[in-house]
Image (cartoon, rainbow, N blue to C red):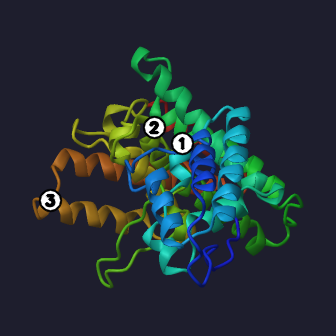
Amino acid sequence: QVTVAPGSAAPVEPASPPSAEVTEQVAARLRAAGLNEQPMLGDTAISGHMQRLAAGEVDAETLLQYAADLDRLNRFSTEQGGSIPTAFWDVRSKEMAANGWDEYTVVRQIAVPEAEPYLLLLAQGYGRFLRFKATEAAGEDTALDAALDIFAAVAVYQEKMSPQPEPVDDPAAVKGRADAMLMVWQSLVAGSTRTNPLTGEPLFSHSIFARDNVGTIYQYDVGQEMSIAEMWGVTGFAPQFVGIAQNNNQVEHMSISMVLQLVLGESAIVLDGIEVEKAAAGKADEAEAQADMALNNAIQRDFVPFFTGDWQQAVERLRATLKGRPAE
């Protein structure tokens, strides 16, 4: 992923208020870049940037550079078939603020040529998601296929970032590469995690990049908040892996179960135990628990043993199994 240096682009001392002409120029450039006039989903929007400008919290030069960087991101993602809404970038998340980052710094560093592999990853992943959303109503595509297909975009990204594969006689290095690929994929399709019931801490984290996923991007396209389950649904999954209609988060469940089993070494038995406990406590329907356990075990049987050696074979085996056509 992109390495973002800490620090804010805002001046240390409040800048003098710009002239009316400069203020109008900055607003026009931000508008041309595609930012919202007013905040919609936590974005700063033109109104927020202009308030900062008037208060001396940011200078005109920084905002003009920001607009130019957004233009580059817009052009690049559109050319790659996955046009990312400008407002998606225009956010200062809690994680960013806690690390001394702001939207100007992050966008500046993603807009440089060296970060193109990561931007390409987001654009290609989002492009695949958009094709799914455009045809899902007609039954021409499925959530399962789209989610698993995104592995191909991750493979391209990994090849660009680390073109020399680890030697096959170094198992630790080979597994490390596979683990990294799976973590990037999980971040892109869901970006979520689960909480350790003993410590209350996340089992794994994607830091500020957790919001760089197709679902969050899509919310800025449609202009409304949606859950991962609402955006993905469960098309493509055979009934035994869904159970009941309310159990509609199977793409997220699949992605987290993969990480827990392959990267963190958690057994399906332990994960199944959590589902049994939830059902016994009335926190989950029995049919839902059975479906989640079936999904965990399919991943253990048809994905985990093969992914490190051949990610494509593992993905296709799992695809066949989850569609109800067990792999040979």
Determine crowd level at label 2: few under 14, some 14-19, many 20+ residues with C-alpha closer than 10 A.
Answer: many
- Residue 274, compared with residue 151, is above or below; it is below
Residue 265: x, y in percent? 52, 71
Q: Could you give the CA–CA distance between mark 3 and mark 2, rounded to whole angstroms?
A: 25 Å
- Amino acid identity at mark 2: Leu
State whether residue 188 is above or below residue 222.
below
Q: Read off the residue under disc 2.
A: 322
Q: Residue at x 46, y 52 (%)?
A: 45
> Mark 1–mark 2 contact, CB under 8 Å?
yes
Q: Residue 168: which quarter of the image? A: bottom right
The first of marks 3 and 1 along the sequence is 3
Residue 114 image offset from top left, x and y in percent: 82, 59
Residue 19 is left or right of residue 197, and the answer is right
Q: Nearer the viewer, mark 3 or mark 1?
A: 3
- Residue 308 seen from this side: no
Which residue position is annotated with label 1?
318
Give, as a three-letter code, the residue at label 3.
Lys
Q: Quadrant of the N terminus?
A: bottom right
